[in-house]
Image: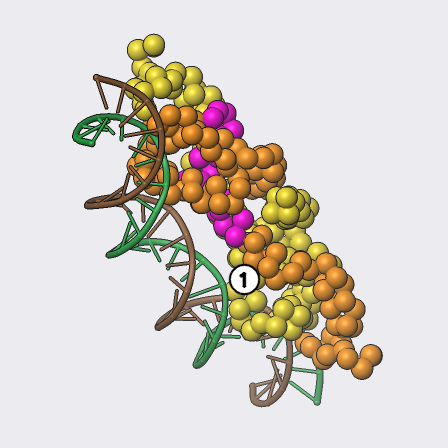
Chain colours: A yellow, B orange, C brown, D green
Amino acid sequence: MAIHDVECCETFQTHEEILKLVNAQMPEEDELYDLAELFKVFGDSTRIRILYVLFEAEVCVCDLAQVLNMTQSAVSHQLKILKQSKLVKSRREGKSVFYSLADGHVRTIIAQGREHINE
Amino acid sequence: MAIHDVECCETFQTHEEILKLVNAQMPEEDELYDLAELFKVFGDSTRIRILYVLFEAEVCVCDLAQVLNMTQSAVSHQLKILKQSKLVKSRREGKSVFYSLADGHVRTIIAQGREHINE
DNA sequence: TGAACATATGAACAGTTGTTCAAATGAATG
DNA sequence: CATTCATTTGAACAACTGTTCATATGTTCA
């Protein structure tokens, strides 16, 4: 048993080795935080519904509000969050603002999540 | 303009078509809820850190607590959540309980998330 | 410029979440 | 079977989140 190994639940595992492995792969604290923030965005069924609409078409805010039967204010608040995390982008056309998906990761992540829960 | 189209932000879009497309692809409400619940689990940096440890090795609760510098109670609470969402499985060996990843979707989802934020 | 429309924003409120502390369960061992 | 160790659980508390309501911003057009 190496010097720096720690006794724990009497297994006397080589914690040093585990620590090395883990520290080598574990992202920086900032990145872990950003990662959690990103997944928090997916962690709300309203936002997922918005994303599903954007899978099909580029739409304006009041279209989203109608299709999803929500307040336009509520939709706008959620769109802001989606935009801040760069899952969605917007384009102004006259009085309207049109939203669409920002990149393909959204589809992959949601597809994987769906696969997982349907196992 | 078809009969059921709705006037909205003066674009007179064919909402009927959008609605058809969206409704065809949009999962049931239950599944949307489950999906959001799943991503909520990823939406906490503590749980992501736990998953990163489990990427490297099967470990017991007090190992996790030590490696992550957390209360063993806090770790246990989070493991319960990870287990309920089937991201993690456990195996008892004497007094200890060892945790490991339940399937490969975890890796894919986190990898995609990481790709997204590093763009 | 002023009215009308589409969207964004801020404050406030209820509901949810992660941690801590204390206590309970479960397993091995003398 | 009582003790010890590893883990789980429940209650409680502060921090955070999504919606609503009221209001502000920004754009078009008469």
Of residues C5 and C3, the one nearer the viewer is C5
Residue A84 visible: no
Q: Position of residue B56 (x, y in %)?
A: 50, 25
Please name the amino acid that badge 1 sits on. Answer: Gln
For the point 46% across and 30% down, the residue is B91
Displayed quadrant of residue D28: bottom right
Residue A69 visible somewhere in the drawing: yes
Give the left or right position of residue D16, taking residue B22 as reference: left
**For numbered disc 1, what is the local secondary structure?**
helix
Secondary structure, magenta segment, majority class: helix
Looking at the image, which is closer to me, B80 or A71? Answer: B80
Residue B7 x, y percent position in the rendering: 72, 80
Q: Mark 1 points at which residue?
A: A78
Q: What stretch is highlighted in magenta?
A: B37-58
Q: Quadrant of residue B80?
A: top left
Q: Which of D8 and C29 is in front in this view?
A: C29
Seen in the picture, residue D12 relative to A109 is either above or below; the reply is below
Q: Is residue A36 above or below residue B72?
A: below
What residue sits 72% from the left and 58% below the top? Answer: B25
Q: Is residue A18 above or below residue B17?
A: above
For the C terminus of chain A, the image quarter is top right
Q: Which chain carries label 1?
A: A
Residue at the (68%, 60%) spot, across then down = B26
